[in-house]
Structures are given as structure tokens and as C-alpha cells.
Image (tube, rainbow, N blue to C red):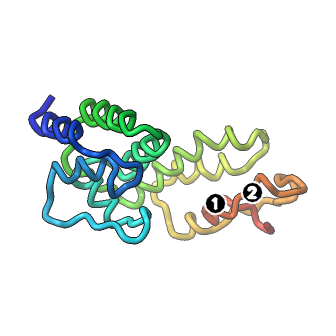
Amino acid sequence: MTDLQDSLLDRFVGARVGVNWPDGPLAIAAGVVGGTRPIQFGQTDNDRAAKGEVARRLGYPVILCEAIQGANRGLTAEDDRRSLAITLLGTLPLAGPIPKRSSLEQNRIAARIALRVHPYGCRRADCPVPRALAGLVASPTVTLEMAITRPAWDARRFARADKKNLSTGLPVWLIPSGV
């Protein structure tokens, strides 16, 4: 355990560990780590700048911070939230700067994740989405057209009558044409 982690654990012993971002374990930890920019949340917890500053100070990806905060929100007792914070922040090393990824690397990572999780939501053997995702991963370059163009498949073959399996939150190139 590092001196910084020891300081974090000492702070959690006496601090009130809240449910939300501004008073939750990550904001407390970011306060102990310190930084040159202030962490100021807006009217809601959805302030990306504040979340980004917390993640930068801790050296964690924002998605990990969101997962920790989500676990924290699921606990009703303050002692449970404190225990979670002490366990996680005492175990996970505070990393250095978050590595920068190129757009191509980000697209490939997202496509690989989508390729792995797609079978859990779609059981159709003839679904063209895995083929499109595999093409995106294998391509030496990812153009804007590849990212925003929809594959030409017939949505009537893949959508149920009630269309509840289609999400308008999907990237445009994952939504079947004609939907």
C-alpha cells in the first residue's frame, strides 16, 4: 500500500461517504489526491467536466469511475459505502495519466466490445451486424463513412413485429435500413 492510499483510507474513516458524485467516495478520494483544477459539479451529477477531473486525478478511466459510483449508489448504509470505498481504493492502484487513444484505436475497441456482446442480444444466425463489426475491426483504416453508413440489409427480416429489439440509441451504422 502506498502512502497516498494510506492517506485515502485515513480520510474515509472520518468522512461522510454519500451516495452521489459530489459527496461520494471518488470525489473524496480526488480531494485527497489534489489537483490544480477545482472539482465543481453543476445542478446534477451529470457534469462531465467534474467527472473527468475526478477520473484524471485518480488515474482511472471514466467508465471505471461510473461503475464504482454505480456500485456506491446501490448501497443504502453509509458504513457499506465506506467499506466499498476502502476496499476498492485500497486495492486498485492509483494510476498515472490515462493513456490517450487514437480515434482508430477507440473505434476498434468499441467494435470488439460490441462484437462480443452482440450474441447476448441477438440470437439470429444470419444477422449481418457481427459481419459489419468484424469488417470494422479488420479494416486498416476507419473512415467517417464506415462509422455512419448503415449496412444495406432488410430490416423486415431481422425485426420482430413490435420492433422492441431495435434501439434508437444505437449508433446509426448498427440500425437496419428502413427502420
Residue 130 at x, y percent in the picture: 65, 46
- Residue 168 figure quarter: bottom right
Label 2 near label 1: C-beta < 8 Å? yes
**Quadrant holding the N terminus:** top left
Tell me: 118 left or right of 72.
right
- Residue 17 figure quarter: top left
Dot 2: within a 10 Å radius of its alpha carbon, few (fewer than 14), some, or many (20 or more) residues?
A: some
Q: CA distance from mark 1 to mark 2?
A: 8 Å
* Residue identifier under label 2: 166
Residue at 82% across, 52% down: 158
Amino acid of disc 1: Leu
Residue 165 at x, y percent in the picture: 77, 52
**Residue projecting furthest to the right:** 161
Amino acid of disc 2: Leu
Residue 178 at x, y percent in the picture: 80, 68
Residue at 37% across, 55% down: 21
Above or below, comparing residue 6 to residue 134 in the picture: above
The dot on residue 40 is: none
Kind of element beneath mark 2:
loop
* Residue identifier under label 1: 170
Kind of element beneath mark 1:
loop
Tell me: 16 left or right of 160.
left
Residue 153 at x, y percent in the picture: 78, 59
Above or below, comparing residue 10 to residue 59 in the picture: above
